[in-house]
Amino acid sequence: MSEAPRPALRTPRLGRPARLDPDRIVAAALTMDLDTLTMQALAERLGVATSALYRWVDGREGLLDLVSRRMAERITPAAPPTAETWREWLLDLARSVHREFRAIPGFATRMLTGPHRDAGHLPIEEGAVAAFVLGGADREHAQQYWYVFAAALLGWTSIEEGGRFPVDPPMDFDVLLDVLMRGYLAEPPEGPHRPPTV
């Protein structure tokens, strides 16, 4: 007597696709006022339960850290600086900071003063310091050059966003970059950190 055929194995049904991921969370957060953002308000914007957000971030502070890290990824040039590209690397970084931060009101000021300014930004700092070293600075001064460079970029963007620049003559971001790079390439009075003349 032959055995009855066994039923075919059924492919397990997949659950509903995840409604959240870090990119979607950040995209929604960046449409809201980060100074007053709450987990509940963000969950409502995303159309999910607040508890669903906590599977991705551990609260408002973790959320803001996530936003900061994702913004850092956006503005970091894809390739590291080299002896041939260090100057262009810094200019690309500066233009990315200006473009991305201008699109998010208040973000430049938050990066200057907020508690989340360091989240995810170590690769940017390391790249910038390396660029200044490749340009001729010793490491100690390269670190200081980066702080000045970053403060100038964020300060300019914050002032521009607040409408505090004079209308006439209109302010030009490329002038800031020109001043920063000329200042860096200018020969200092003394010390081993003099960059090469280009």
Image (tube, rainbow, N blue to C red):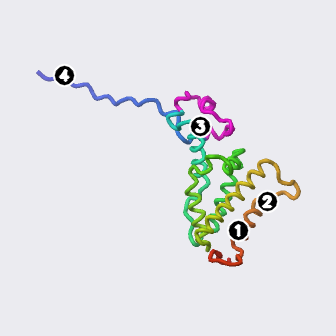
Residue identifier under label 3? 60
Magenta span: 27-52
Q: Nearer the viewer, mark 1 or mark 2?
A: 1
Mark 2 or 4: in front is 2
Which residue position holds label 2? 172
**What residue is pinned by disc 4?**
4
Residue type indicated by callout 1: Met
Report if residue 47 lies within the magenta region.
Answer: yes
- Report, in whole angstroms, how far the alpha carbon at label 4 lies from the one at label 1: 82 Å
**Residue lying furthest right:** 168
Could you tell me how far apart the alpha carbons at marks 3 and 2 are, in whole angstroms? Answer: 36 Å
Q: Amino acid at mark 4?
A: Ala
Q: Looking at the picture, which amino acid does disc 3 mark?
A: Arg
Name which residue lies at 56% across and 40% down.
62
Dividing the image into 4 quarters, which one contains the C terminus? bottom right
The residue pinned by badge 1 equals 181
Question: Would residue 62 be found to the left or right of residue 188 on screen?
Answer: left
Q: Earlier in the sequence, mark 1 or mark 3?
A: 3
Q: Please give the count of numbered marks on the rendered protein.
A: 4
Tell me which label, 1 or 2, sits earlier in the chain: 2
Residue positioned 66% across, 63% down in the render: 91
How far apart in space, not on screen, are marks 1 and 2 (Cα)?
15 Å
Question: Does residue 35 show up magenta in the picture?
Answer: yes
- The N terminus sits in image quarter: top left
In this rendered view, identify the residue nearer to me: 8 or 126: 126
Label 1 sits on a secondary structure element that is helix
Chain-order first, disc 4 or disc 3: 4
Mark toward the start of the polypeptide (2 vs 4): 4
Amino acid type, callout 2: Asp
| Neighbourhood count class around disc 2 (C-alpha, 10 Å): few under 14, some 14–19, many 20 upward | few
